[in-house]
Amino acid sequence: MRWGVGFGLTAMVAIGLVLLFLLTEATSNRDLYERNYTLLFAINVVVASLLLIAIGWIAYRLIKRLRQKKFGSRLLLKLAAVFALAGFMPGVLIYVVSYQFVSRSIESWFDVKVEGALDAGLNLGRTTLEALSADLVGKTRLAAAQLADRADVSIALPLERARDAMGAEELQLWGASGRLIAAAGQSRYLLTPDTPSPQQFRTARGQRVISWVEGLEESVAGQPALARIKVLALLNSIGVGSLGEARYLLATKQLPASLVDNALAVTQANREYQERALARDGLRRMYIGTLTLSLFLAVFGGVLLAVVLGNQIVRPLLVLADGVREVAAGDLSPKASLRGRDELDGLTRSFADMTQQLFDARQAVQVSMSQTNAARANLQTILDNLTTGVMVLEADGTVISSNPGATRILKLPMTACEGQRLAEITGLTAFGEGVQQQFDAFLAPDRERSLDHWQQSFELGNASLDGIGRPSNNTLTLIARGAELPGNQYLLVFDDISEIVSAQRAQAWGEVARRLAHEIKNPLTPIQLSAERLEMKLTGKLAAQEQALLTKSVKTIVDQVDAMKRLVNEFRDYARLPAAELKAVDLNALAQDVLALYAHEHTEVPILAELDPVCPQIQGDPQQLRQVLHNLLQNAQDATVSAGRADPDRAVVLKTQWLASSQRVRLTVQDNGTGFPDHILKRAFEPYVTTKDKGTGLGLAVVKKIADEHGTRVDISNRQLDGQSVGAQVSLSFGIERAPEQRSV
């Protein structure tokens, strides 16, 4: 390979030098250039092609090494590029300058003035010939008019006189058949004078007179002139001839020798000039091809030199690369090195010493890393399994990291929110601002801290998505604790105590309901009996006006006592709600049974059922679920009526839906009322929270308590349309009935 590359390089350089020599010789020897132009051009093309192939082969080898990711390939490529540019850029500069010089030099050989002078000389010769022809045509036409009435037998003398008057060398009278009738001049002594062609006779007959020049192409400069002008004219009196045929007068006049010589010289000079002008493009291509070849030689030499030197430089680097690759793979055993005296060989020896030191250091690092990884794994396991939410914040409230417990409590993808300020996360604005205020107050320089943390409860509305992608508003009650970490970072730990608070409230309201039922119900019966006894004793003893007042007052007392009894009974039922007896229930069939009771009630607010036929059976207490349906449907109809939207087209919707993704059955009741205010929506399931004028606020509380007994999630939200509230909806999500083997598992 090396011998082949060396031989090819030598051959190309030799051919290039020969071409340069021939190029310089062609500048002074035009004949040599013209004889060998094709050969020189072919050699140029061949050498340029070979150089391109060689450069392409080198580029291919470099790119192949690069794709194989061999070490040193990038360095070789850079060196080749540097050397190529080092030879290419000056070569391009010389090439451009030489190109301009060659182009302008060759163009200067063909001056526009010379070409214009030659064209002017040719035009002058043509004009002179045309003037002489026109003069002879005029004289011939005049002579033809004079000889038109002469008979053939007596025309010889007038013909001679006409020739002398015209100054012509020859004057001949021809018949239409090509018969010479008479002649004046030297042609009368010729046996076979030149006869005009039949075509010329026909043309003269049609045009009356024609002219042409003969012998100009056969004339040679410096020799006797053979060029002459001939004019053929038709005589008007045709019937005068002896045979009655048309007669033609042919006049011949010799051109001046000087005129012929000058015309021939100008024509020859113009022909040679045009030949050279046509050859100048080839000459320019020859020069430019040789210049291009020189540029290729420079680039090829630079690339070849880059490859040779690059291999010498890369050799110790390859040894280092092998060692680095082994070190990267974890092998710190003694590495190979070179014994040369240059810096790169010394670098290989230093690298071998360094790997031994790294081996010793790695042993100590591995021990420390194993301990650190064990501690980190334990900490991460603890954080991942904590039900408590844990966050690490920057001083400005930016979330650095969080555990799965934070995502589970806040129902937001906290991992995706890392890098954002807590107060800028959708749904956590109030919580983030409150936490930041607590940290600012806790870390205030003028505050005395008895503890190393602060603790505060927060209540926030968590805007999340339910099982089918619809918004659900839940109120979260969080107990949060914060502490300062090293590095100007904060630790935030929080837990969801919503269920605890809700259970405490439910327990408190249950106790209140029990006591109210006990304390209020006992005096209600005596009050009612006393009022009825008064009416019975005084009836018939009073005047009509007083009797009417008595009857109205007693009725008011009895009605209010009945209302209080119903209220007390509802409180008692809420406090003494029995435990749910769960069994398989067909929710669609249960809903149809309940809807049958509403067929003739509240006809102004119809109930539209959308029951999913694929809903499986659920686990529930039929009696308690029936009470849930009654409460929800009654509330929905009352809300629609109170909003003034009672319309057969605005029905209450009772919907069941099978959620295959979560394996749950969803029950939804939608009304067309005004919806709930925000402060009511957050506490809608608490007892005595209502928007009705005469409501007790226990309907949704009972629904929530039954849902808790069934382990069911219940959501309440307002339905929005174009930013306006168009009603509310309550949804419950039930677990399905499992097969016996699944329940045992």
Image (cartoon, grey):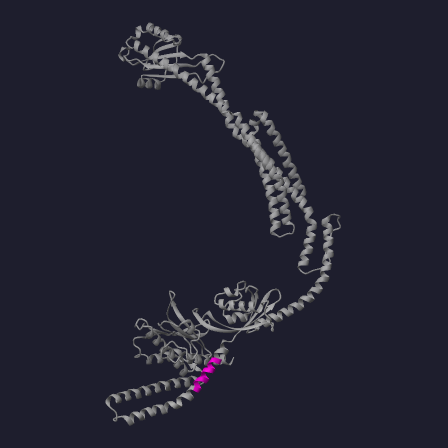
Relative to 675, 379 lies left or right: right
Q: Residue at x 49, y 66 (%)?
A: 429
Q: Residue at x 58, y 27 (%)?
A: 26
What's drawn in magenta, residue-wise?
504-515
Of 245 and 556, which appears nearest the observer? Answer: 556
Rendered residue at 68%/61% (across/down):
330
Report the predominant secondary structure element of the magenta stretch: helix
**Residue 512 visible within the image:** yes
Outermost residue toward the left in this view: 544
Residue 618 position by quadrant: bottom left
Quarter of the figure that contains the N terminus: top right
Asked whether the viewer can see residue 577, the reply is no
Q: Nearer the viewer, residue 9 or 713?
A: 713
The image position of residue 40, as x and y in percent, is 58, 31
Q: Where is residue 148 in the image (x, y as percent from the top left)?
A: 29, 10
Q: Magenta includes 509?
A: yes
Foreground residue, 385 or 267?
385
Above or below, comparing residue 57 to residue 27 in the picture = below
Above or below for 433 versus 111: below
Instruction: Indicate the position of residue 321 as horizontal and vertical percent values.
Output: 67, 53
**Is 466 left or right of 480, judged from the image as shown?**
left
